[in-house]
Amino acid sequence: MTFIISKPCVGVMDGACVEVCPVDCIYSKPGDTQLFINPDECIDCAACEPVCPENAIFDEDDVPDDQQEFIKLNYDYDYDSSEPGANA
C-alpha cells in the first residue's frame, strides 16, 4: 500500500509534502502539473498527508471514487526521468 496524490494537487503543487517526506519519494519534473508519490519508495509513514494544504493525499485504499484514475497515474509515472521535489 502507498499514498496517492490526487486531483486537488493538479495545478497547485504546493510542495509542503516534499518538505516532510523522510525518504524523498515525492517526484515531479518541469512541466508536470502535479506531484507524484513513488509507490516503490513510499514507506507509508503518512507524514505527507496532514501537511497537504489541498487535501490531495490519500492512502491508496481511501482515494475517492471519482479520483481512482490518480492511483494509476502515480503508479505509472516515469520516476526514472524525474527527481524528488517540486521541480515545476
Image (tube, rainbow, N blue to C red):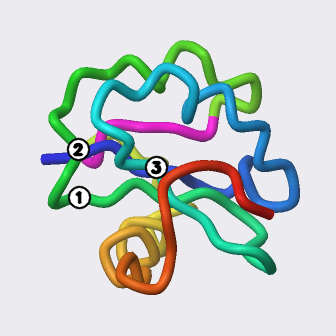
Residue holding disc 2? 42
Q: 12 and 6: which one is in front? A: 12
Could you tell me the amino acid type at mark 2? Answer: Cys
**Residue 26, labelled with which disc?**
3
Q: Is residue 60 depicted above or below 21 in this figure?
A: below
The magenta region covers: 56-60
Left or right, 14 with respect to 38, comes to right
Residue projecting furthest to the right: 11
Q: Is residue 9 depicted above or below 77 in this figure?
A: above
* Majority secondary structure of magenta residues: strand
Could you tell me the amino acid type at mark 1? Answer: Pro
Instruction: Give x and y (percent) for residue 60.
Output: 28, 48
Residue holding disc 1? 39
Label tally = 3
Q: Quadrant of the C terminus?
A: bottom right
Instruction: Give x and y (percent) for residue 53.
Output: 75, 23
* Label 2 element class: loop
* Label 3 element class: strand
Residue drawn at the location 78% of the way across and 38% of the way down: 14
